[in-house]
Image: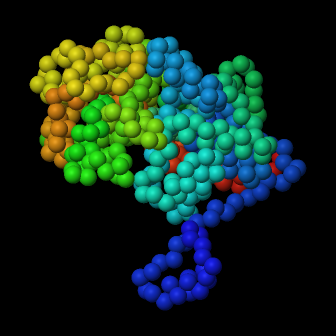
Amino acid sequence: MDVETTKEKQIIANLYKYKNVKITPDMEYKFIAQAPKSLTERPIVVGTGPCGLFAGLILAQMGFKPIIIERGKNVKDRSLDTFNFWKKGEFNPNSNVQFGEGGAGTFSDGKLNTQIKDPNHYGRKVLQELVKSGAPDEILYICKPHVGTFRLVKVVENIRNQIISLGGEIRFESKVIDILINENKIDSVILENGEIIKSCHVIFAIGHSARDTFRMLFDRGVCMEAKPFSVGFRIEHSQELIDKGRLGKFAKDERLGAADYKLVHHCSNGRSVYSFCMCPGGRVVAATSENGCVVTNGMSQYTRDEQNANSAIVVGVEPKDYSDGVLGGMEFQEELEKNAYVLGGSDYSAPAQLVGDFLTGKTSGGQGSVRPSYQPGVKFTDLSGAMPEYIITAIREALPQFDKQIKGFAMNDAVLTGVETRTSSPVRIVRNDDYQSVNIEGLYPGGEGAGYAGGIISAAIDGIKIAESVALSILKNPQ
Ligand SMILES: Cc1cc2nc3c(=O)[nH]c(=O)nc-3n(C[C@H](O)[C@H](O)[C@H](O)COP(=O)(O)OP(=O)(O)OC[C@H]3O[C@@H](n4cnc5c(N)ncnc54)[C@H](O)[C@@H]3O)c2cc1C
């Protein structure tokens, strides 16, 4: 129920008289199970991104006392490591934008819209829990809600505290490096420190960047397949230009906030170019999780009041575009990221180019009116060697088309920074209708890394569904 009045029943009865009025369905979340007190088996959740965190939260709320394992640090310490990398270029491969409590979306714009079908209104449960943990109430009713980075950090801490208060356990700086399988059923996980934790129910919510874990699961014979994703560059303009292009004479109206955009162009070479993860009034961030790689992404604070607007301008790639094999897409991403590291000067600076130079094929010598926000810094160069030729051709065709929709989009001084490779997972860990791996019973692949989500809300919803499936399975055969 979204609205309550003193004459609630009477008002609702009156509304039913009108054919075109639909009463809001009951969106209250109802727990599917409750753990018996005698239960000794504890489900394991690997990863504390939105998928793992919500799987853990729902299991804990149902009384299943999950053990949650996270390779990175708690969100406060992780934030220090991440800012240290951005400011000083000191990189920690287990504590960064991708890895650590809160998962990949912690340093983000915190956009909370999703396009997935959600007939059971699980998204509502996610939003309610976020509000309970410190997100602003408005996310429950505005059209395109967002939380911003600093608030997300607090929200994540509060969800963790709730899980612990319900009997769950969270272990940071604990990486799962192997699994034990017995007669096609999962038996235990092995941590990097050698500890073995037993459970017949293990949720893998590892995100799209856990390449070592993908390799391990593949080596252990877990059924996986290559899947399409997208690659390209981040583009930056002044937010003022985007506001003018999108809002015209209302551009300065504070009530409208910083404008966003969504663009797509179908190219003559058969490729589609589109804008992705647009961050109004935000910054481009260094988002690698591996040594010797450069990866871009974007984030904003809740206020969205920084000078620049950014988005990824990406082109879809499919398994046929890169080398054969299930892990071919992951290797393709890795190759692009290593190449970008070298192009940027091998010190975690990102390679960058002015849009005008990119379009005419000229090496850029320095910035113009748009100041690149990427830290630890950018090196102006020629980006045409940073991506396969069909991608460069497609982006060169698309930018002038986007300029027709937002005047100035292809302006000379706009900045392209490379490379954007982690748009979604390069693999799918195949699962059945019970959310379990098709060939390893008790292994539940979930969220973005397993190929079943594409954002904070969809990953969290997937986590809820998996938690329910795990709970029902444990209750069938309680130990
Ligand atoms: C900079 C940035 C900005 C983004 N902005 C938005 C946005 O505004 N809105 C939006 O909807 N989406 C955004 N996204 C995407 C969103 O963050 C992801 O879709 C979402 O986080 C996926 O959730 P997940 O739980 O599946 O995986 P993740 O969030 O990636 O979490 C996986 C977790 O598993 C841990 N892990 C991995 N391997 C192991 C292991 N072997 N052992 C133990 N732990 C392990 C990792 O450390 C990580 O914490 C953004 C992503 C980034 C990087």
Q: Is residue 395 visible?
A: yes
Q: Is residue 200 visible?
A: no
Residue 248 in the image: x percent, y percent?
21, 50
> Between 393 and 221, which is closer to the camera in this rendering?
393
Q: Would residue 168 be found to the left or right of residue 204 on screen?
A: right
Quadrant of the rendered structure where residue 393 is?
A: top left
Residue 146 in the image: x percent, y percent?
46, 47
Residue 209 against residue 128 in the figure, above or below: above
Q: How is the image coloured?
A: rainbow
Residue 379 against residue 159 in the figure, above or below: above
Which residue lies at the image location 65% right of the left edge and 38% below the top edge? 157
Instruction: Report how many numbered discs are placed on residues in the image.
Output: 0
Residue 378 in the image: x percent, y percent?
32, 18
Which residue lies at the image location 47% right of the left edge and 13% below the top edge? 88
> Between 356 and 368, which is closer to the camera in this rendering?
368
Q: Would residue 439 be found to the left or right of residue 180 on screen?
A: left
Quadrant of the rendered structure where residue 229 is?
A: top left
Residue 390 in the image: x percent, y percent?
21, 31
Which residue lies at the image location 68% right of the left edge and 32% below the top edge? 69
Which residue lies at the image location 21% right of the left edge and 34% below the top edge? 395
